[in-house]
Image (cartoon, helix red, strand yellow):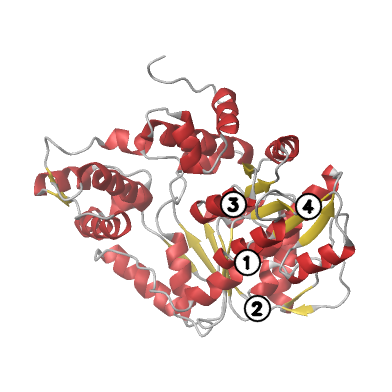
Amino acid sequence: MTVHILIVDDEQPIRDSLGGLFEDEGYLVSTAPSGEEAVARFRKHPVDCIFLDIWMPGIDGLETMIRIKKIDPNVPVIMMSGHATIDTAVKATKLGAFDFIEKPFSSDKLLILLRNAIDKRRLAMENSDLKFESHRDLPQLIGESAVMQSVREAIEKAAQKETPVLILGEHGTGKSIAARLLHEGSKRSNDPFVRVNAVAIGKDQVEHELFGYEKGAFSGALQSHRGRLEAAHQGSVYFDEITDVSFQIQVSLLKVMLEHRIQRIGGSVPVPCDIRVIAGSLYQEESAKKRLTQALYERLNGTVIHMPNLRNRPEDISLLLSYFAARQAVNLGGDAVKFSDDVISVLEAYDWPGNMRELRNYVERCHILCAGKELTLTTMLPLDASAQSMPAFSTVPDDTVLTDGFHDARKRFECSYIVHHLEKNDWNVSKTAAEIGMERSQLHRKIKSHDLIPPQK
C-alpha cells in the first residue's frame, strides 16, 4: 500500500521541495499551507506521516499537532523548524512528536526519519489489528458443495495440530481465509495472527521486517525495531505466497521454526519466537517444491490443504451471490441486488478465472449500478467487462496487478485512482483535488505524468 505523507509549512518552496523528494521515492504526498487546513485535510483524509513546521501564521505547529493527535494519537508527526530552541524541541517531543528536524534539511536524514516513522506506525497498527482480530467475527468459507465440506473438515483437523500447514490454490480461492480459520481453531487463537506478503514489503526490506534489528545495526537504524516474527510470538504467521520469499530468507525461517528463537539484525542475544507457520502458494506441489528449499518444503508438506477453484464447484455460486450481495448492501448502502434463476445459470456456467475474488468484484459492480434490482438476462452486466471496469484500487488487487513489479503496480494503481475520481467529478480538477486531499498543482502534474486526457478532448 502506498504511504501517504502530509507536509504542513507556510512556505511553498519548502512544500514543493519536500513533496518532490518524497514523490521521487514513491510516496503519495499532500500539502497544506497552514495548521487549520492541515487539521481539516487530516480529518477528511488520514495520512501515514506528517511533516509539520512549528512557526506558522494562525495556529502554530504545536497546537496543530495537539489537534491532529486528538483525531489519531498514533500518527507520527515530525516537527520542522529553522530557528527553534532546545526547550521547543523538548516540548514538542513531550506532546507526542515522533522526532524533530532543523532546517536546512538533509535529504538522507529526512528519508531515514520517514522510514523509521512509517515502521513504527506499521507496527502499532499491526498490534492494534492483532487485538481487534481476536474479537471480530470469524471469516467464512462459503459453500455447501462436497469439496468445500472436505476443505472445512481438513481445516478443522489441521487446526488442532501444532505442525506447519501448506495451503495451495489459485488466486482468489480463499487461502488467507483458510489460514485465519486454522489459527482461530487452534490453541493459539488468543495470541497474534500475523500475515506476511513478501512482495508488498519489498525484497530489500523483507529481512528487516521479519527479524527486526537493533539500533545502529546499519545506516539509518536509529532505533531498535521488533520484526513481525517476534511480534507473532506464541501465535501464527501466514506467509501469503511463500514461493515469493528468497531462498536465503527461507533458510532463516526454517531455523526459527526449528529453534523457536530469532536474532535481530545487529543483535547478539537470541529472542524467543514460538510461532506456527502457515504458508500459501498458488502453485501445486511439484511447482511449489521447485521454488522452495528442500528442507522447508519437507517441513511444510506434512499437512497440505487444497483450495478448490470456483469453476469446480458451480453449485456454490447461488449461495455466494446471496452472501456477497448482502455484504455489499451493508458496506455500500442500499438494498441488495438480486439475480434471476436464468442469470444464476449463466454465472454457474462461467469459468471464473479470478475465482471468488472475481465473483465478489462482479457483485460489487452490480450493486453499484443496480442496487435493489433483480438482474435478468436482458439487464445483467457483461462478465467479460466486469474485471476491466472494476477500479484497480479494489481492497484486494486483481491477478494482473499481483504479477507486476512493485513500481508498475503502484503506477497503475495511482493512474486508476486518479481517473476514477476525475470521472466521478466530470474532470473538474479543483473539485477532484479537494476530494482526494491533493493540491491542484500537484494533481495537474500527476495528470500530465500519466498522459491523461479528458474525454471531450
Mark 1 residue element? loop
Question: Distance of mark 1 from mark 2, alpha carbons?
Answer: 23 Å
Q: Earlier in the sequence, mark 4 or mark 1?
A: 1
Quadrant (top left/top right/bottom left/bottom right) for the C terminus = top left
Name the residue at 29% across, 52% down.
312
- Mark 4 sits on what residue? 80
Residue type at mark 2 is His
- Mark 1 sits on what residue? 74
Q: Are marks 4 and 2 in contact (CB under 8 Å)?
A: no
Q: Earlier in the sequence, mark 4 or mark 2?
A: 4
Q: Which image quarter: residue 439? A: top right
**Foreground label between 4 and 1:** 4
- Mark 3 sits on what residue? 36
Q: Position of residue 218 (x, y in %)?
A: 88, 57
Q: Earlier in the sequence, mark 1 or mark 2?
A: 1
Other residues around mark 4 within 10 Å, as few (<14) / some (14–19) / many (≥20): many
Question: Distance of mark 4 from mark 2, alpha carbons?
Answer: 37 Å
Question: Distance of mark 2 from mark 3, alpha carbons?
Answer: 43 Å
Other residues around mark 2 within 10 Å, as few (<14) / some (14–19) / many (≥20): many
Q: Is residue 60 left or right of residue 360?
A: right
Q: Which label sits on residue 233?
A: 2
Q: Are marks 3 and 1 in contact (CB under 8 Å)?
A: no
Could you say which is closer to the camera, residue 209 or residue 147? 209
Q: Which image quarter: residue 33? A: top right
Mark 3 residue element? helix
